[in-house]
Amino acid sequence: MSVQAEIGILDHVDGSSAFVSQDTKVICSVTGPIEPKARQELPTQLALEIIVRPAKGVATTREKVLEDKLRAVLTPLITRHCYPRQLCQITCQILESGEDEAEFSLRELSCCINAACLALVDAGIALNSMCASIPIAIIKDTSDIIVDPTAEQLKISLSVHTLALEFVNGGKVVKNVLLLDSNGDFNEDQLFSLLELGEQKCQELVTNIRRIIQDNISSRLVV
C-alpha cells in the first residue's frame, strides 16, 4: 500500500495534515481545544465537532454518514477527560475522491481517518493510542482480496470494506477494531481472511505514519 502524508501544512490552525492514497486525496485541519458553544459543551470531557466536505458540490447525507463513522473511530483515541468543557473542531476536505462517489465511500473514509489522526498529533491533542485505516475489496470473479483497491477494481468487486484498527505499545500491538464497515456479499472465511490481511497492512501503515511524525518532529528540533 503506497501512501503519501504530510503534517503541519496549514497556517492559522492548531494542527493539519494531508493524506494521499492512489487517486484519493484529503487534507485535515484541527482547531482546539477551544471554548465551545453552550449547546456543545460537555462538563467532564472534550466535545468533538467533525466536518467532512466533499470534493464536489455541497455536503449531503453521504458526508453526514462519513462524519458519524469518523466520530466513532476518533472518540476512543482521544484522552477526552483532559479537556473538560472544551471543543475540538476536526475538518476533512476531500480534494479527490478516487472512487465513484455515487456507489462508494470507503477510500474517502479511510483517508479521512488517517489524515485526522495525523492532524490530531500535529495539534498536540492527547491521545490514548494510534489508529490506521485501509480500504479492502473482494473481487467478484476471482474472490481475490485487494487492499487499497482502485476505482476500476471497486466496480468489479463483490464486497467492499473499511477497516480501522487501534494500536498501542508504539504501534506494535492491536488493541481494538475501531471500525469494520462492510457492504456486499461475503462469507465468514473471507471475512477472517481480510481481517488477517488487513491487520498486516494496517501494521505497516501505522509504522509509516509514526515515521512521518518522527521525521516532522526531528525537522522542527533542527530548526
Image (cartoon, rainbow, N blue to C red):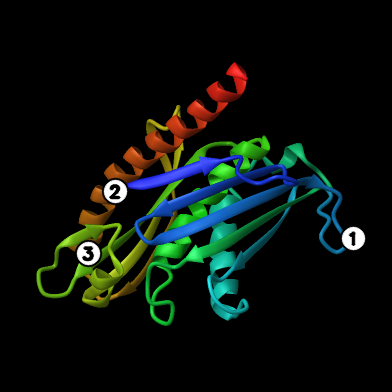
Q: Quadrant of residue 206?
A: top left
Q: Residue at coordinates 84% horizontally, 50% vertically from top-left? A: 43
Q: Quadrant of residue 144?
A: bottom left
Q: Quadrant of residue 81?
A: top right
Q: Which residue is mark 1?
A: 38
The residue furthest left is: 142
Position of residue 86 measured from the top left corner of the image (x, y, whole percent): 81, 47
Q: Which residue is mark 3?
A: 188
Q: Residue at coordinates 51% horizontally, 32% vertically from top-left? A: 213
Q: Amino acid at mark 3?
A: Glu
Q: Residues within 10 Å of mark 2 (few under 14, many from 20)?
A: few
Tell me if residue 81 comes above or below residue 180 in the rendering: above
| Of pointers 3 and 1, the one earlier in the residue sequence | 1
CA separation in Å, label 2 and label 1: 43 Å
Label 3 with label 2: CB-CB less than 8 Å: no
Tell me if residue 63 comes above or below residue 71 in the rendering: below
Name the residue nearer the viewer: 130 or 151.
Answer: 151
Q: Which residue is mark 2?
A: 1
Would residue 44 be visible to someone looking at this image? no
- In the displayed structure, does residue 206 sit left or right of residue 158? right
- In the displayed structure, does residue 223 sit left or right of residue 132? right
Would residue 64 be visible to someone looking at this image? yes
Q: Amino acid at mark 2?
A: Met
Position of residue 210 measured from the top left corner of the image (x, y, whole percent): 45, 32
CA separation in Å, label 3 and label 2: 25 Å
- In the displayed structure, does residue 134 sit left or right of residue 159? right
Q: Residue at coordinates 82% horizontally, 47% vertically from top-left? A: 34
